[in-house]
């Protein structure tokens, strides 16, 4: 196992950052670390620091990890209060002026602003939906590990899942008991998507109608098979 003396300055930086984020929900933690990695990539591509650089030089460029976490927490406090526009305004102002907290924290704020502008309703951010924190659960973390793109994940939740289950429910409506259980599963899925506050609404409406249709049809078909013809 590597000791701290054997770790590179960059490894030490991320080790410190990870320890500070140990109690942060997994999705939010991944957002923060991903933003810091973007700042590091930009640093390496632009050769902003001489090679090899020291940990002190890295701190001077990226900023203290504690400051990174402080900026991220401040953003989330504002976002949870339903004032995401303030984060967007702060990020825009930081683009045109020097900030004291370093490139890593700045990148975290820029990424928060980007997520608010593009996918705010997916994670419960912004003024158009009720205030809600970024929720982390087992399914979210598994999907995020499989689908890295925010846009693809958004389309997966907003369109693919509800439409696919709606079509499946409609096509199996008369199959006993498949249609019934598929309809019940689709309703559970709709509850999950409702918690995530995905948009637009129409794919979920289609899925809800299709699942109810499948449940009713399979119940009627079951009654007829049992001899309860009206």
Image (tube, helix red, strand yellow):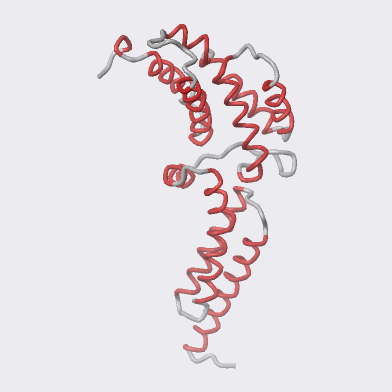
Q: Quadrant of the C terminus?
A: bottom right
Residue 51, given in percent of the width and then of the height, sits at 39, 11
Front residue (pair 89, 66):
89
Residue 121 occupies quadrant: top right
43 left or right of 90?
Answer: left
Q: Nearer the viewer, residue 73 or 114?
A: 114
Q: Is residue 192 above or below residue 39?
A: below
Point out the residue furthest to the left here.
1
- Residue name at image x 25 percent, y 19 percent: 1
Q: Relative to residue 134, is residue 3 depicted above or below?
A: above
Q: In the image, residue 211 lies at what x, y percent?
A: 57, 69
Q: Is residue 80 left or right of residue 15?
A: right
User: 138 and 121: which one is in front?
Assistant: 121
**Vertical relation: 24 (above or below) 70:** below
Horizontal arrangement in the rendering, residue 187 relative to residue 40 (left or right): right
The structure residue drawn at horizontal position 62% and vertical position 37%, both measured from the top left corner, is 115
The image position of residue 175, as x and y in percent, is 46, 80
**Which of the two residues, 62 or 196, is positioned nearer the viewer here?**
62
Task: Locate residue 155, reporting x and y percent.
Answer: 56, 53
Residue positioned most to the front: 46
Q: Residue at x 53, y 48 (%)?
A: 153
**Exactly how many numbered labels are in the figure?**
0
Vertical placement of 181 versus 90: above or below?
Answer: below
């Amino acid at each position: 196992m590597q000791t701290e003396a054997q770790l590179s300055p960059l490894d030490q930086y991320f080790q410190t950052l990870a320890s500070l984020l140990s109690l942060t929900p997994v999705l939010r933690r991944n957002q923060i670390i991903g933003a810091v990695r973007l700042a590091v990539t930009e640093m390496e591509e632009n050769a902003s620091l001489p090679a090899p650089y020291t940990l002190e030089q890295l701190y001077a460029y990226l900023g203290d990890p504690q400051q990174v976490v402080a900026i991220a927490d401040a953003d989330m406090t504002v976002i949870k209060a339903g004032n995401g526009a303030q984060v967007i305004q702060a990020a825009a102002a930081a683009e045109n002026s020097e900030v004291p907290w370093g490139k890593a924290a700045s990148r975290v704020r820029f990424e928060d602003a980007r997520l608010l502008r593009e996918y705010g309703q997916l994670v419960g951010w912004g003024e158009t939906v009720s205030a809600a924190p970024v929720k982390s659960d087992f399914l979210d973390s598994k999907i995020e590990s499989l689908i890295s793109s925010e846009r693809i994940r958004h389309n997966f939740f907003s369109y693919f899942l509800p439409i696919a289950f709606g079509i499946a429910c409609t096509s199996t409506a008369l199959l006993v008991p498949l249609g019934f259980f598929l309809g019940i599963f689709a309703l559970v899925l709709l509850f999950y998507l409702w918690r995530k506050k995905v948009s637009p609404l129409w794919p979920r409406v289609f899925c809800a109608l299709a699942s109810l249709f499948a449940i009713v049809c399979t119940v009627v078909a079951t009654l007829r098979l049992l001899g309860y013809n009206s």
